[in-house]
Amino acid sequence: MIYFLGDVHGRIDHVLPAIRPRGDATATVVFLGDIEAQCPFEEDIRPLTEAGIGVWFIHGNHDTDRQRSWDHLQGSWHRCLDGRVVQIEGVRVAGLGGIFRGEVWYPDGVAATHQKPAVRSYGDYLARLKASTLPRLRDSANVTEKALKHLSTVFPEVVDRLADQEADILVTHEAPSCHPHGFPAMDLLAQVMGVKAVFHGHHHDGRDYGAWEAKMGFRTYGVDLRGITDMKGERVVAGEFDYARRY
């Protein structure tokens, strides 16, 4: 069974007690971004891996708020699904980490479908940043912060790479358009890849998107803050905000 973990924001102590008692022949967890690992990720997940649980992840926008959060993920890049399709427990799972940022996708300052993105890749963005910065300021904190922040930006190059592949499940940090703050570009990517389901984090919101399935052509599941949802869409652990809404 595959389990999808809503944004954990530095805490994963709830994961093993929820997964281990279920008695799956095999179990894999997928972090949906905003991990904010407090130590090297391999150390953080050791209780899971020692219990025989597989671990994959995508990154979220808050994983580049601090350099140390990003650094803590670097030794685990073999577990990252961003821009890849991986066979997990017989299921093709694709990943798209990060968020859409206007500086890249809407250079005119208005969200419009006719606009062309300002750059296609992170490398292009760095070159543009360097070219637009005075030489004496290129090592400034502001430039460094911009370069770090955009490590969690969705770039067209990654979207196009995924669009050339097929998958059963797409995991994303951003949401499709069925969420009030979602993006039609996510709908199109899921449709082109032929996925049956999308699982997303980011909004700390475990919404019921059932009414959208026929229109979009795939099922969508939002996983709330520190919530856990299985690959069938069943809520294993209610997110912290799900619980607050209920009570």
Image (tube, rainbow, N blue to C red):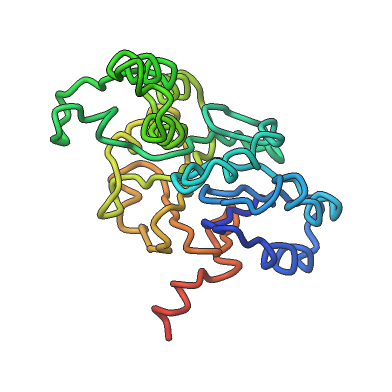
Residue 127 falls in which quadrant of the image? top left
Residue 203 falls in which quadrant of the image? bottom left
* Extreme residue in the bottom direction: 247
Residue 186 falls in which quadrant of the image? top left
Q: Tell me where residue 198 appears, x and y as whole percent.
A: 46, 45
Q: Which residue is more in the foreground, 221 or 61?
A: 61
Using the rendered image of the protein, determine whether residue 31 is visible from the camera's viewpoint.
yes
Q: Tell me where residue 218 appears, x and y as whole percent.
A: 40, 44
Quadrant where the image shows the C terminus: bottom left
What residue lies at 52% left-to-right and 27% top-to-bottom? 83
Q: Tell me where residue 81 appears, x and y as whole percent.
A: 59, 34
What residue lies at 62% left-to-right and 35% top-to-bottom? 80
Q: Is residue 25 left or right of residue 245?
A: right
Q: Tell me where residue 122 appears, x and y as whole percent.
A: 43, 22
Q: Is residue 178 above or below residue 83?
A: below
* Extreme residue in the front direction: 136
Using the rendered image of the protein, determine whether residue 197 is visible from the camera's viewpoint.
no
